Amino acid sequence: MNNIQIRNYQPGDFQQLCAIFIRAVTMTASQHYSPQQISAWAQIDESRWKEKLAKSQVWVAIINAQPVGFISRIEHYIDMLFVDPEYTRRGVASALLKPLIKSESELTVDASITAKPFFERYGFQTVKQ
């Protein structure tokens, strides 16, 4: 998919990124986690999230002027990478990750069971489970 634009996070994106996160967790990750785990994971403390995003480098994937995914990095650690379920398997996550891989010699991530195969395709290795 070549119409993906990547731009820096803007505070006006906050609610849309929260919605992407909740949809990704409840729809995409639900195949690997119990309903109780999903329910706990999908909770957003808005003040904590705003603080976390302010301390991170965050990029947003845009298709047709709408945010469809995002990635956040704190130093060499990928803190979040989520794509709206409507746009999975369309190159959005790759478009978000590839620039970081090119610019960083070492990146780490605590990948979910759902995301682990994606990160492994880009050379990430499991250190512990």
Image: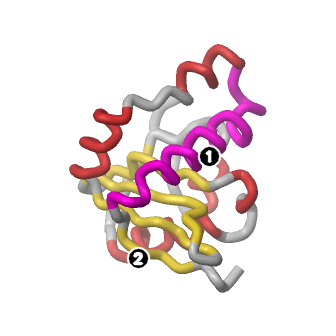
Label 2: few (<14), some (14–19) or many (≥20) C-alpha neighbours in 10 Å: few
Q: Nearer the viewer, residue 1 or 99?
A: 1
**Residue farthest along the bottom direction in this orientation:** 2
Residue identified by numbered label 2: 102
Give left or right: position of 103 versus 3.
left
**Mark 1 touches mark 2? (CB < 8 Å):** no
Identify the secondary structure beneath mark 2. helix
Residue identified by numbered label 1: 115
Identify the secondary structure beneath mark 1. loop
Task: Give the colouring mode of the picture.
Answer: secondary structure
Q: Earlier in the sequence, mark 1 or mark 2?
A: 2
Give left or right: position of 91 versus 95.
right
Prevailing SS of the magenta stretch? helix
Q: At which x and y percent is residue 9?
A: 37, 64
**Residue farthest along the top direction in this orientation:** 36
Q: Work out whether 109 lies above or below 100.
A: above
Q: Nearer the viewer, residue 14 or 1?
A: 14
- Please report the residue visible at 32 percent of the width from the left and 67 percent of the height from the top: 105
Q: Is residue 30 located in the magenta-colored stretch of the structure? A: yes
Give left or right: position of 32 versus 64.
right
- Please report the residue visible at 62 percent of the width from the left and 46 percent of the height from the top: 115
Q: Is residue 26 located in the magenta-colored stretch of the structure? A: yes
**Three-letter code for the amino acid on which mark 1 is drawn:** Ala
Span of residues in magenta: 11-34
Label 1: few (<14), some (14–19) or many (≥20) C-alpha neighbours in 10 Å: some
Q: Nearer the viewer, residue 74 or 42?
A: 42
Name the quarter where the N terminus is drawn.
Answer: bottom right
Q: At which x and y percent is residue 53?
A: 31, 49
Q: Work out whether 29 lies above or below 71.
A: above
